[in-house]
């Protein structure tokens, strides 16, 4: 997740969950998302959520690595946050590589399938963290492995109501202090706190919230017990700058926003 400071117009980059390793590491023992539960790997929501690893290279050597979440929107396309893959980390590099990991439990490498992406496309109107165009599509060269399936995108956006609880998934930090990186997919239900024409807001707390590394992860609304994708997590809104990270509201992209629909349409 990234963080937006409201009223001060300053964006404090929390970034995706950073890890200075050349390969994916699995040494941590706690899960992702603040609070919440470990998501059932067999659930429809879990089977469309992926782990995204971004590496920046200089002269063939990795100089920076970060982690985000993503959601499968077609058999070969993954939606994530643009700020995860824009390479704007203040690092000198000459090549960016992204890989996606399919698997809810990433604590054991044999539990997951890791593929490199063949293309990264950032929304043409993306300019800064947390804006409604903070989206990117990662393309893979072949169909996602079974049992992974694309998320179903919601269509009845007018039925959304303030206060209804949305299902948010991610591989982000489960704790800021101490900083605890993920080893499995978690989810949390957060109330819808804002409906704008181009984005949504959810209200988190210190006990239950999204955090660093959840950027790009899916946000679902449930209808008849089934998950429908309405957007992706992209930023935290700082209402009170005295409170710590990952304790307040978060910005969610709106897949019904016309500029978002036009961007992802060719990939569906």
Image (cartoon, grey):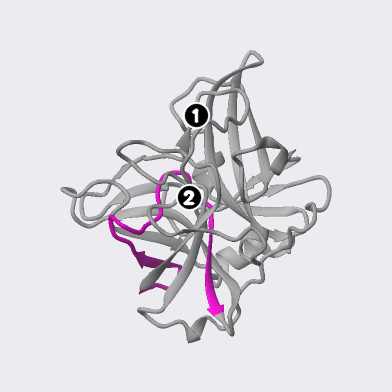
Label 1: which residue? Answer: 19
* Side (left or right) of 221 relative to 179: right
Say which residue label 2 marks: 214
One can see residue 112 in this view: no
**Does residue 128 appear in the picture of this structure?**
yes
Q: Within 10 angstroms of label 2, few (less than 14), some, or many (20 or more) residues?
A: many
Asked if residue 163 lies in the magenta stretch, the reply is: no
Q: Residue 210: x and y, percent? A: 40, 54
Left or right of residue 129, residue 261 in this image: right
Report the residue at 77% width, 58% height from top. Answer: 147
Residue 173: x %, y % from top left:
43, 44
Please tell me whether mark 1 sits on a helix, a strand or a loop. Answer: loop
| The C terminus, quarter of image | bottom right
Image x and y of residue 118, in percent: 76, 40
- Residue drawn at 67 percent across, 53 percent down: 78
In this picture, is 100 found above or below 147? Answer: above
Q: How busy is the neighbourhood of tag 1: few (under 14 within 10 Å), some, or many (20 plus)?
A: some
* Residue 256, percent from left and from top: 55, 73
- Mark 2, secondary structure of its residue: loop
Residue 221 in the magenta stretch? The answer is yes
* Quarter of the rendering containing residue 251: bottom left
Q: Which residues are magenta?
A: 194-222
């Amino acid at each position: 997740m990234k963080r937006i400071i409201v009223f001060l117009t300053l964006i404090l980059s929390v970034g995706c969950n950073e890890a200075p390793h050349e390969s994916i590491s699995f040494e941590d023992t706690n899960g992702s998302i603040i609070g919440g539960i470990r998501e059932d790997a067999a659930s429809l929501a879990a089977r469309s959520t992926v782990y995204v690893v971004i590496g920046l290279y200089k002269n063939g050597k990795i100089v920076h690595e970060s982690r985000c979440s993503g959601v499968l929107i077609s058999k070969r396309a993954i939606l994530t946050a643009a700020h995860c893959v824009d390479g704007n980390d203040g690092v000198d590099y000459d090549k960016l590589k992204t890989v996606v990991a399919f698997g809810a439990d990433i604590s054991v490498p044999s539990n997951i399938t890791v593929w490199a992406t063949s293309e990264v496309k950032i929304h043409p109107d993306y300019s800064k963290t947390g804006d409604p165009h903070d989206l990117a599509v990662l393309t893979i060269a072949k169909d996602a492995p079974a049992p992974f399936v694309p998320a179903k995108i919601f269509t009845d956006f007018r039925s959304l109501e303030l206060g209804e609880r949305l299902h948010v998934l991610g591989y982000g930090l489960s704790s800021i202090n101490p900083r605890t990186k993920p080893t499995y997919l978690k989810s949390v239900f957060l109330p819808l706190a804002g409906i704008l024409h181009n984005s949504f807001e959810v209200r988190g707390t210190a006990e239950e919230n999204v955090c660093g590394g959840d950027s790009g992860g899916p946000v679902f609304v449930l209808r008849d017990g089934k998950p429908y994708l309405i957007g992706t997590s992209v930023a935290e809104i700082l209402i009170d700058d005295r409170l710590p990270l990952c304790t307040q509201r978060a910005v969610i992209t709106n897949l019904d926003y016309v500029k978002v629909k036009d961007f992802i349409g060719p990939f569906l």
